[in-house]
Structure formats: C-alpha cells, structure tokens
Image (tube, helix red, strand yellow):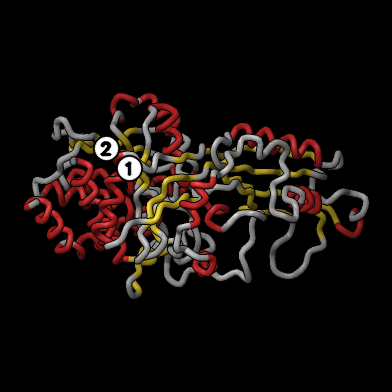
Amino acid sequence: MKHLDAALASVTSQQSAALADLIEFSAIPSISTLSERNPDTRRAAQWVVAKLNSIGMEHAQLFETDRHPVVYADWLHAPGKPTILLYGHYDVQPADPLAEWNTDPFTPTQRGDNLYARGASDMKAQVLTLIRSVGALLAAGSLAVNVKFLIEGEEEIGSPSLSKFIPAHASRLQCDYMVSADSGILKPDIPSIVYGLRGLAYFELWVQGPQTDLHSGMFGGVVHNPANVLARLIAGMHDSDGHILLPGFYDDVVTLDPAERAVLAATPYTDADVLAAAANPPQLYGERGFSSAERIGARPTLDVNGMLSGFTGEGSKTVLPAKSMAKISTRLVPNQDPAKVATQMRAYLAQHAPPSVRWTLNLLSGAHPAVVDRNSPGMQAAVRAMHTVFGKAPVLVREGGSVPIVGLMRTHLNIDTVMLGFALHDDGIHGPNEKQHIPTFWRGIETFVHFFSNAAQ
C-alpha cells in the first residue's frame, strides 16, 4: 500500500508534466491516411518509443509494416502475475474542415479545462494515461503485473497491417488479456466501461456515366446523370423506419436478450445528453423500436461519410457530371462479417443500379464487432479502479465505434480485451475543435494506477 500511495502521489505532483507531454504529442500531425504526413506519423511513433524508454520499459522499438510502424515495449519482471497487453494508436484523423476550427488543430490550445487539438482525445491522451500510470508505478517500485505495449499507427484507416502483424508476432504478444485505452466514459461525473464495440465495413462507391462532363442543357434528359443515380441508390438503402435494405443484411444480427436490454437501459446518459454531444441537431433519428443506447452500441447502421460529384465551386456551372462518388460506412454488430456485408452491398447495387451507368465498389477497410465478458477478472479490476477514483460504480455500455484490434486479437490469439479509456462523448472526436477534458485525463492516469494494482491481486 505504501508503494501504491507513492505512485498516486507522483501522479498528482506530475500533472503539469503530463499535460506538457499531451501538448507535445498532440502537436505532431500524425495523419495516417495522408501520404504527405508519413514523416510526421513516423515522428509520432518515435516519440512514443522515446517516452517508453524514459519510464523504464524494455525492448522499446519500432516494427516496420507495409505502411506505418508498430511500437512495442515490455516489462516482464512480475513472475506468477498476469501479463497485460496495453493497446493504443498514435495516428489521427485529418483535421478537415480547417475553417471550422477555432484554433490551429496542431497547435494544442488550452481553454478552461479543455485542451483543443486533433488527436488530443482520440487517442493521444489515452495513450499517455497508459504510459504515465505505468511510469508512476515503476518509479515507485510498485508495478506488480507484467505489461507489454502495442501502439500502432493505422487505427484511423482500419488497422490494415495488424492482420499480418499479430499472427507474425503471436509469441511476442501472448498475454492473459489486452487493455485497449481507445475508449471513453459517458461524462466527467459518470464513469463507464465499454464492453462491446461495433465492427466496420467502409466502402467507396463510384457511379460512372459519360466519359467526360457534359453540358446539362444539351444532354440533360437524354444522358442519365450519375449524381442523380447515386442519390437514388443511397436513398434506397433505408426504409422509412430506418431499417437497412441490403439483401440479407440482418441475417446474422444477434438479437438483444432482455437481460442485456436491461443493462443498456440502466445508463443515465439520456437522449438530451446525446443531442448535446451530437452538436444539437433538431431531433434524434434512428431505427424504429430501439432506444438510443441500443441504436448506438447494439444495432447496425449504414451512413454516407462523404459525396463528390460535378461542380461545387462558387457560383453556377450547368454541367452534367461524368461520375459521382460516395464514401459509405456500415457499423456492424455480432455476428456480422465485413466481407459478407460487402457481398450484400454488391447484390443491392446489382439489383438497383440502372444499365445507363457503370458502378464500382471498393471495400476500403473492415473490422469485426466484439462483445467481452462483463465478469472477467480484467473487467472486475477495471470496475473497482473506477469506483475508487470516481466514487461510484461505472455504468456498463456498448459503444458505437470500431477498434479493429479487439476482433483481431480474439480471432488470431483467442485473447479478450478490457476497454478502459477516458474520452468523452462531447470531445468532438473526428470533427472540428476536438478536445480532451484535462481533469478527466488526470483521473484516467489515477484510475490506471489502481487498475494495475487490482489486476495483480
């Protein structure tokens, strides 16, 4: 207990240093999807290696992949105690639209209790909760479990390299369970633990008409407009009740049993909270017959993430576009498979696309859904740690996002995951003015200190 108290005192005394780390880390524009940012993405990986070395981790190194390197380190000096693999990612989403940011996305700026920067919440602060909690325990001589770090640089593009990396390094990654810090809580005063994640199938759909753009007055009405076709195809993917109309889409969807519906219904996160976190749309929308908590975490979705066609500049140009494109994501639930959903999407297009256009569909990324055992030793250690720090038991929730490694670790190594992180629903993740709530960041470090102590017991 004396050593644990020393580690907790260190966390408190080092809050300014932790914030300085977050500012420095968040200033690196490690945008994994943009090739021109590859040097910055590598610089972020090297920053993580240096930080792991500085706290006393061993074997800290980069492993090269087809795109961005994986960071690995370990400390294995607790014989007979659990070995826990700690997961995070150092890459971030693009910052577009830049005009909607109040400050530069890669000039971290503190306003009140928040630090604004792209990647501050998703998930550089979460990576640092792991690093700084382990560092505090090592410095106090009280780390009583074995830990391994796996910090990747491709999560924001679907973790394509991990499907090769994990089986190739299976012995190196063996552990009792994994902890993913790529997670969050409902509110600063409502602790929560995610026990389920949705999967993902992300598509790029092109509709091609004529070989070049045409004069809409000369050819409108005799040449089928690809933008009109794409809009009709997308509109036909849902019915008026919000159900998705890809053939066979719901065949593998696991029905929620009454016990789990009761767990999800117990969350104090209300529809009003959802509206506020969602930047206040006029009202909520979703699949008929399900609550917001069920729609977010336990039901599949299909959404357009972007569209491109024709003339979009200032003023007018009477053009009939030659082609039109949409980025479409589907969030999946157990037991849906991304490859099977791609087959269902192609079947829908083959059935509904007119012969007056050609279409191509590319599956850009995929991830399997995952639901973990709510009563596992790792989950119970996390529950106790949150209860200690926040003064109340955490709510158990299913989250709508996707973390590909969770499914990959189960598929390749039969390893389950505890999802313990401290992002907030209103942090603006993936949008403009992303932020990390600084007091929650500090509480996250403290929670992990208690978690590792609980896990040893």
Residue assigned mark 1: 179
Seen at 69% across and 64% down, the residue is 313
10 Å neighbourhood of mark 2: few (<14), some, or many (≥20)?
many
Residue 447 in sight: yes
Q: Mark 2 near mark 1, Cβ–Cβ under 8 Å?
A: yes
Locate residue 397, reporting x and y percent. Answer: 44, 52
* Helix, strand or loop for disc 1: strand
Seen at 30% across and 41% down, the residue is 378
* Helix, strand or loop for disc 2: strand
| Sequence-wise first label, 2 or 1 | 2
Q: Quadrant of residue 178?
A: top left
* 347 to 192, vertically: above or below: above
Seen at 67% across and 39% down, the residue is 249
In the image, farthest residue toward the front: 258
* 208 to 410, vertically: above or below: below
In the image, farthest residue toward the bottom: 112
Q: Quadrant of residue 416?
A: top left
Locate residue 133, reporting x and y percent. Answer: 21, 51
Residue assigned mark 2: 84
- The residue closer to the viewer here, 89 or 347, is 347
In the image, farthest residue toward the left: 2
Q: Quadrant of residue 209?
A: top right
Name the disc covering residue 53, or none: none
- The residue closer to the viewer here, 345 or 246, is 246
